[in-house]
Every structure is written in C-alpha cells, then in structure tokens.
Amino acid sequence: MSQNPVMESPRPPAQPAASFSQGLRKTDGGKTRRSLLLIAPLLIFIVVCFLFPILSILSKSVENPEVHDGLPQTSAALSRWSGNSLPDEALFATLGKELVAARDGGQIAAVAKRMSYEDSAFRRMIVTAPRLVPADGQQVKAALIAGQPLWGELSTWQTLKRVSAPLTGYYLLSVFDRQVDVKSGKVQAIPADKALYVNVLLRTLWMALVVTLLCVGIGYPLAYWLAKQPTNRANLLMILVLLPFWTSLIVRTASWIVLLQSGGLINRALMATGIIDHPLTLVFNRIGVFIAMTHILLPFIVLPLYAVMKGISPAYVRAAISLGAHPFLAFWRVYVPQTWAGIAAGALLVFMMAIGYYVTPALLGGPDDQMVSYFVAFFTNSTMNWGMAAALGSQLLVIVLLLYIVYVRVTRTAAEAAAH
C-alpha cells in the first residue's frame, strides 16, 4: 500500500529589503513631522521676535530712502543720466519742482541731512535751493547755479545720483573709516583727523582682551581652589561666585563708583594705612572700567573652569610627582593641559560679552574709554541715524558670530568631533 507524501504548505515570500527600508523611512518621517509640529511655536516665536527684528535693523545699514523717496522723479531721471556732463534744463526743472514740494511737505530736512553725510556744504545747498527756484519754473538751471555755484559742478550731480539710489554702502564704509570721494567716485580713506570708528573698534577689542586676560588670571586659581574643596563647602562658596548674577548691572556699576571715587572706601582705606598720601584716580578712566567689567564677567569663566576641573582626577598629578616630577612641573604639564577646553570656552564667552558692553564703560569710563556699543546707542538715541547704528551693530554681530564658531569648535567633545 503506497504512502501519499505529505504536502508541505508553501512558505510566504521574504519581505524585500527595499520595502523594509521604505517602511522605516516612513516611520522616521512621521516622527520628524510630529517633532516639527511640537517645536513649530518656538520656531515661529524665534523668527518673529528675534530673527526678524535683527534682520530688519541690520538692513538699515544699506537702505538709502531719504533722497530716493523724497525726490522720486529726480532719482528716476538721475538713474538715466549719463553723468558725463551737467544735466539739461529739464532735469534741473524737475529737481527744483520736487525740492519746493519737499520743503512744503517737510521732507527737505531729511534730504539735506542725507546729502550732508557726503559733504557738509551740501546741507546749505539743498535747504536754500527752493528759494532760488523761479516761480514760473523757467530757467531753473541758471537760477540755481547763480545762487549756489555747487549746482554747477559735475561732482555735485554725481554725488546726488549716487545718493539717490535705494541702496548704499556709505554706512558700511564709514564704520571702517572709508568714504567715496565726491569728485573721483573712488573709495578712499577718511582723513586721519576725522577717522574714528576703526580706532573705536580696535579699542573695543583691546579692552575686551584685557578684561578676558584678567578674568582668566583671577578665575583660574579661584576655580582650582573651589574644585579642591569638599562638595558642601564648594557649593556654598559657589553661591558667593554667583551672587553678582542676582544684582542689577546698574547697581553693581554704581557700587564701584562709590568704592573707587576719590573719597571712596578704597582710597580712604589706602590712605588710612599709609600706603598712599593722596587719592588715586580709579574712576572715570580705563582702570575703573577694567575693574568693574572683570568683577561682572568673572563668573562666566569660573563656571566652565570649575566644571572641567571637577572631572579631573587628582591621581594624574600624584602619579607624575611619584615618578620624580616637581609639583609645579607636574601641575603645569599634567593638570593644566586637561583644562584647556574650559579656559578656551570661558575666555571666548567673556570676550564675546565684553565687546558688547555699554553701561559699565559709559558710567565708569571717560571719553576715550567708550566702546562700539556706546556709539550704537548714540546714533540710535541722539542723532537718530539708524544707518550708522545698524552698520556698527553689523560689525559687532560679525565678530560675535566668528567667535561663536570658534567657541562651538573648542567646546565640541571628541565624540561630537568624530561624528562630524
């Protein structure tokens, strides 16, 4: 009797690898979309309340609306003008009519102010021009040239054409002490007696560097001492380091004025002990600025150094000493190299914050101790020159962004560096 073979049921085909990858990508895509939806309110808040205002302000460093909007027909005609010879009577007539309209509409002051940036003589030329325009609008060219000879110079019209453009590089050139020559139209250095902003930038970088070095010199031994203390005592002492964060910046600065002035506590103490015979000048100069800024920024370097030092085992230095190294040599060649990341991170953080300081130099410093931020506030609040304020702000922003890139690279861990 023959036995029927048992028929095996067919196995389901294996799922292709491509289908598995597609399913995995679909799952990851869904997670990504859900994550984006969760952080969308934060992204919108950052764009609306942070990025958009910054970009809006920085755009004013290249915007040039005064002449372009105040004299629109003249600006359009100048864009077609060759610039090789004086304009014809029609362009003069258009300019005269728009200057009269700008005077009646209250816009001529803005036009004159913008022209005065190029040459101070242009302000009077613009302000007096409407009175020189004939009532019948005829022979405007002859009347303007007769009343103000500057209207008969080709360089005046070339400057007016350049200023009437909607965008300008004037402000960005000015913060580097450069300008466009009125006659040649070439970029050249501002005369030495009028140059200012490059010196201010160099002064800002120098003062920030000195404050950073002072913070490193004071903060390193302080962080080292804190790292060697027992945990409970170190936490208590760290509260004292963080105490300045809980006090207003203006209050701290005003306190230093009280301490450093001629009749302040420091001078009186030094005179009482016989160290000095007359009060030292410690305020309203650069010494006072350095002292106050170092005090305010010191916690920003102590914290990263303390965090790094707490993770260093004391066994390394003991091992070096046991092998015959001098204690100082063991400290310098074994311990200090392990803290380079904390030093670099803290120093960059202090430097980035120091270059943007305004309140402390303004209250404790003299005229020669003001930093870039002082002039940003001056152009914003006093002269209402938003273009110069935005250009100076762009200067600081570029420096801070470059330093931030360095900061990210310095503080990147070995694992993160390997992943990138």
Image (cartoon, rainbow, N blue to C red):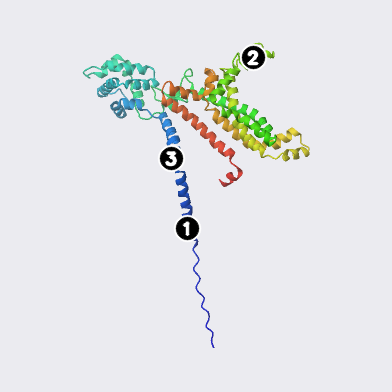
Separation of disc 2 and disc 1 at Cα?
78 Å
Mark 1 residue element: helix
* 128 with respect to 58 (left or right): left
List x then y, in percent, for residue 90. 25, 24
Q: Secondary structure at mark 3?
A: helix
User: In front: 152, or 34?
Assistant: 34
- Can you name the residue that lies furthest to the top here? 277
Label 3 Cα crowd, 10 Å radius (few <14 / some 14-19 / many 20+): few
Crowd class of label 1 (few under 14; some 14 to 19; many from 20; radius 10 Å): few
Marks 2 and 3: CB-CB under 8 Å?
Answer: no
Disc 2 crowd rating (10 Å Cα; few below 14, some 14-19, many 20+) is: some
Query: Which amino acid is tagged 2?
Result: Arg
Q: Amino acid at mark 1?
A: Gly
- Which residue is rendered at x = 45% and y = 28% of the image? 391
Is residue 278 among the parts visible in the rendering? yes
Q: Quadrant of the C terminus?
A: top right
Q: Which residue is mark 3?
A: 44
Give the left or right position of residue 370, taking residue 146 as reference: right
> Which is more foreground, mark 3 or mark 1?
3
Report the residue marked by disc 2. Answer: 268
| Rendered view: 379 above or below 340 | above
Q: Taking 281 as reference, is 159 left or right?
A: left
Percent x, y of residue 195: 48, 20
Sequence-wise first label, 2 or 1:
1
Task: Please say whether residue 340 is visible from this viewpoint.
Answer: no
Give the residue number, with chain letter if any, for mark 1.
Answer: 23
Give how far apart the Cα atoms at labels 2 and 3 are.
Answer: 55 Å
Q: Earlier in the sequence, mark 3 or mark 1?
A: 1
Of residues 245 and 123, the one nearer the viewer is: 245
State which tag comes first along the sequence, 2 or 3. Answer: 3
